[in-house]
Amino acid sequence: MVQETWQRLTPAQLIETSIRRNEGMLLSNGAFCAQTGKFTGRSPKDKFFVAYEGCPLPQERHQWLTEAQFDRLFAKVQAHLQATGGFVFDGAVNHTEEHRVPVRFYTELAWHNLFVQQLFLNGDSTVTPEYTVYGAPTLTASPEADGTRTDTFIVIHLKRGIVLIGGTEYAGELKKSIFTLMHHHLAERDILPMHCSASVGDAGDVALFFGLSGTGKTTLSADPARRLIGDDEHGWADDGVFNMENGCYAKCIDLSREKEPDIYDAIHYGAVLENVVCDDKREPIYSDRSLTENTRAAYPLSFIRNIEPSGRGDHPHVIVFLSADASGVLPAVARLTPEDARRHYLLGYTSKLAGTERDVVQPEGTFSACFGSPFLTDRPVRYADMLMERIARYDVPVYLLNTGWVGGVYGEVDRVPLKLTRDLVHRIIRGELDNVKTERSEDLFLSVPVAVAGVPDVFLHPEHDEKHQQSYGQRRQELAASFADVLAGYLEMSGSARR
């Protein structure tokens, strides 16, 4: 598809071009900042797969377009991009030669091309890409003619290796389309795709942090005491874990050098900011929520001072599930038995934070299987079984951390202090909580430490919080009931699959 109107530019050239085309501006810290209009988060309800003969994906998990509908929409996208011109980047995904996959991006916007160049590995333009993504944000679909839900579309054709994205300027759709493809591509090769961050210590001890957006994956993996493998998307193969990407995509609401120095200092020339407000001197105002709470920064791993250059690590030493619970029910930390781990992996419980997805304006409880339901291509139990087999094979302890609110609900109490969460992470990695006495919370599938030195009792046992005790019992009952309902659905689904 590359014509004279398509350009292959370096990051510096893309920044210049983006500014010349009024796609955004440079801020005082040197980062390029763009606004994404009405879409400041992903639009998972507008995601479709193409139904072709022999398609291996489970029908009940996805919305579908026919081959004919796809062909019409693809022709429309190609015509639009040929008219507008744009930018092409040949990249790659997966930090391991054995499993590296070439990917190509055609983007209408220059800053979108900068975005993918900063997040993915450099590829080879002479190699035929296995997957090609077409980003046409100013093109809208016709639901009646194209079979889409709205005028926005994210359409994936697995057999032809094509992704079409239109009607949204939110750059995260480009990134997550590849992650979705990897859930099929890697799982077919018996490699577990994971929505997690990863870090490694001097002793080679790898820690994985699973969680949805806003739960702390990026923040907790950017640890000055450890090397960052990656902040969001990984694979777990027979020889260990590897980063799928080559960059980070961090939430930067309320960002400060004091609390998150590595992320703060990574935002300079070459980094991409989304929907960050600035003052008259173009100083970023990270506390400003007027556009969205889902403000974002994208930058290459090389901008972080302490990284694992190979992008790889051994089998995990410990696994941590993250939940930003806005109901105030979950404790700050709990141990999970293997069966508890499977349940919580299938639950993927957290509270969606404002702006992460379209129409989410305040935290709301949600369940996202495997901490990444929008990106799964197969039934969640397949990925859960793959994870549990690996946990058993390598004897990996699993913990749950609540990085949200404990005791009272969102708005009544402050969020768990980051300093406390970091301290708990370090204790978990050192194995200090492996043998502490615990109390069983059977309804929530948790084993909660009776006491941890230096941790206030209310963070371990929110039911002891006198100020919010009256409503806690009801909130806990409701959360436990929702846990049971969601898990019952998976049992029913598994039974149907076997039949």
Image: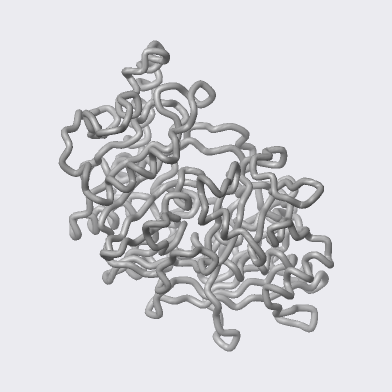
Q: Decide if residue 442 is in sight here.
A: yes
Q: Taking 425 as reference, is 162 left or right?
A: right
Instruction: State the image quarter where residue 227 is shown.
Output: bottom left
* Residue at left offset 36%, top offset 30%: 330
Tell me residue 187's x, y (percent): 37, 64
Quadrant containing the N terminus is bottom right
Question: Percent x, y for residue 205?
Answer: 27, 61
What residue is shown at x 23% (from left), y 57% (from top)? 389
Q: Position of residue 421 (x, y in %)?
A: 39, 40
- Quarter-wise, where is residue 225 in the image? bottom left
Task: Check the image and name the residue furthest to the top.
Answer: 470
Depicted 12 relative to depicted 379: above or below: below
Q: Quadrant of residue 107?
A: bottom right
Relative side of 353 to 499, left or right? right
Name the residue located 64 percent from the left edge and 40 percent from the top edge.
287
Q: Nearer the viewer, residue 190 or 445?
A: 445
Residue 183 in sight from this viewpoint:
no
Q: Is 475 located above or below residue 334 in the figure?
A: above
